[in-house]
């Protein structure tokens, strides 16, 4: 599971990094893909906690950071949809 989480995080980072270098019309599609990956990572992290792979403190810290990243991505998506 740890490998899947790591892979998903790297894919999300790659998607978010691409958004600065592409045309505005394609940004929305990539950001929505990244947002879906963030949701997947949240579920995988929760499963890791439920299976005692990570402790509660680590889980809460990761969820807090993922929530903040999700808010930023969501704000960017809303901005692009309204622009």
Image (cartoon, rainbow, N blue to C red):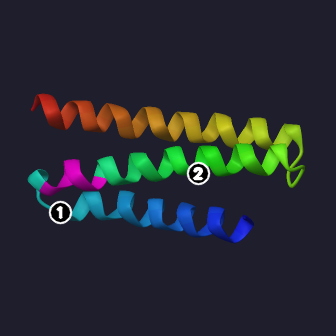
Decide if residue 9 is on the left or right side of residue 3: left
**What numbered label is drawn on residue 76?**
none
For numbered disc 1, what is the local secondary structure? Answer: loop
Q: Which residues are magenta?
A: 26-30
Q: Secondary structure at mark 2?
A: helix
Query: Going 54% across and 63% down the picture, which residue do you hit?
Result: 8
Q: Nearer the viewer, mark 1 or mark 2?
A: 2
Q: Which residue is mark 1?
A: 22
Question: Residue shown at 87%/38% (left/top)?
Answer: 56
- Residue 27 lies in the magenta stretch: yes
Choose between 48 and 72: the one closer to the eye. 48
Position of 2 relative to 44 (above/below): below
Instruction: Where is residue 40? Give x, y as percent.
Output: 54, 50
Instruction: Kindly check if marks 1 and 2 are in contact, taking CB atoms under 8 A apart as contact.
Output: no
Numbered marks: total: 2
Residue 73 in percent (x, y) is at 38, 40
**Quadrant, the C terminus:** top left
- The answer to whether 47 appears left or right of 78 in the picture is right
The answer to if 78 sits in the magenta stretch is: no
Which of 12/49 is in front?
A: 49
- Looking at the rendering, which quadrant does residue 80 occupy? top left
Q: Residues within 10 Å of mark 1 (few under 14, many from 20)?
A: few
Residue for point 81% across, 45% down = 49
Q: Which residue is mark 2?
A: 41
Name which of mark 1 and mark 2 comes first in the sequence: 1
């Amino acid at each position: 599971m740890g490998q899947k989480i790591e892979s998903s995080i790297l894919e999300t980072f790659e998607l978010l990094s691409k958004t600065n270098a592409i045309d505005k019309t394609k940004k929305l599609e990539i950001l929505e893909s990244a947002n879906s990956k963030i949701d997947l990572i949240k579920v995988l992290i929760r499963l890791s906690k439920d299976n005692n792979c990570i402790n509660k403190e680590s889980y809460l810290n990761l969820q807090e950071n993922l929530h903040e990243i999700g808010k930023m991505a969501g704000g960017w998506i809303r901005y692009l949809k309204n622009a």
